[in-house]
Amino acid sequence: MAEYASYALILFALGAYVVLDGYDLGIGILGLFDRSDERRKEYTELVATAWDANESWIILAGVTLWAALPGVYATVLPGVYLPLIVMLLAFVLRGLGLELQSSAPDYRRGWGHLFGISSLVVTVCQGLVVGTVLSGLPQHGGVYDGGALRWLTPYSVLCALGLTALYLLAGAAWLQAKTEGGARRRAARLGRPLLAVTVGACLVLGFGLEVADPQHFRFDQPLRAVLFGLLVAAAAGCGAVAWYGFGKEPDARPFIAVLGAQVAGLLALVTATAPIVVPPGLSVHAATSPVGSQVFLLIGVGCCMPVVLAYNSYAWWVFRGKYRPPAPAALAVPVNHVEVHADLTVSHVPVAEAGVWVLVRRVGFTVLGVGLVAVVQDVFGGQGEWIAPVALVLFGALALAAWLVGDRRSAAAGEFDVEQAARR
């Protein structure tokens, strides 16, 4: 039974990730289509309050999956290497764009676009991976024996589109709950169309799974059929509540309803497929690690999960309520050791200190790139000969572009002009 307890921990961590990180990925994508820089700045400030805590769940799920169900790693990872590597690169660039955007005194479109595009890439890659796993992977003796592009199928593409719609819906619901004014009205206006698209995508993916999935769903078992029906009904009820709540008070109602629909939908999917983890026949029992590893894992993860939950809860409590932009004085560029005279031209800003921080940032970027290549070589083994150079070139090009755009915008804004900074 230890393997099923570990399986439950994995499902809990993955569900927490979808529920928590889904809305901030959706907010990042929504920012790409908003013309107001002021609203875009609000979006990034909202996401900056909890994005790192939200993403910790996918790390916890990955570690638990690796230790508890190594057979899943042996089967799934070789089939989805490329979208997973692209997703990890997008995670890095997304965090870069978000943090630099949040630390800027005003909205920077270069960093904002980097954050939004990376959010879209992460979402699409996750959808491709999920669609590939649900539709089955060719395997022999628990080892993957398909091609390098097995992840690119019609069902996986549809799953990527459906997951994007779901995250956009969660993002719109969260924005209605946390913003005021134009941002709140825009989110409320987008909520119902996004909900309709999401429901349509769920129907297509649900009925399409019968065709795409090579396993036979055992709905002839009464308990499984009843649980599945109840969970689908619960998801539909939450969807109806969200439809009614968009544009109306209390503003938090649509987000709570969307959250409930996500949980019910994930449980319904598990009810339909368990105990098969990777179709057509890799079950929890077949993919599990030894009992001693399971017990060690349950103790370790069991101690970590309360800490992660406490961190998430604390972040939500601290940043509860509506977002309100800071006062203009708080947005002023901080200047150290400024002596104000009548002409406001004398200052003693430690320029060398700023140069040190720039050097540290750039050296860190270089080290990260080298580390990425090392990880790719280890993960891909024989295929690393062509994947490592491609990953390095992609990472280097995107990092260099973000670097140059950020520095040019900072120079245009006068952030490298000490005397102009002092006058602020």
Image (cartoon, rainbow, N blue to C red):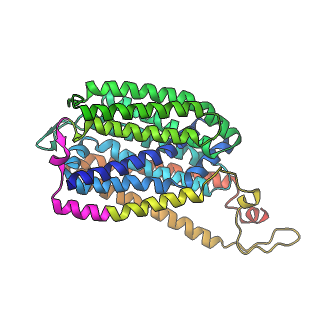
Question: Which quarter of the figure is the C terminus placed in?
Answer: bottom right
Residue 113: x percent and y percent? 56, 43
176 or 86, which is in the foreground?
A: 176
Residue at (51%, 30%) from the top-left corner?
Answer: 240
Residue 261 magenta-drawn?
no
Residue 253: x percent and y percent? 57, 40
Secondary structure mainly formed by the magenta segment: helix
- Could you tell whether 1 is left or right of 410 in the image? left
Q: Can you say whether 91 is above or below 117 in the image?
A: below
Residue at (20%, 46%) from the top-left corner?
Answer: 284
Residue at (19%, 35%) from the top-left corner?
Answer: 280
Q: In which quadrant of the rendered view does residue 30 lie? A: top right
- Magenta segment: 280-301
Residue at the right extreme of this rendering: 342
Q: Is residue 379 visible?
A: no
Q: Can you say whether 155 is above or below 255 in the image?
A: above
Residue 127: x percent and y percent? 38, 37
Residue 284 magenta-drawn?
yes
- Could you tell whether 242 is left or right of 214 in the image? right
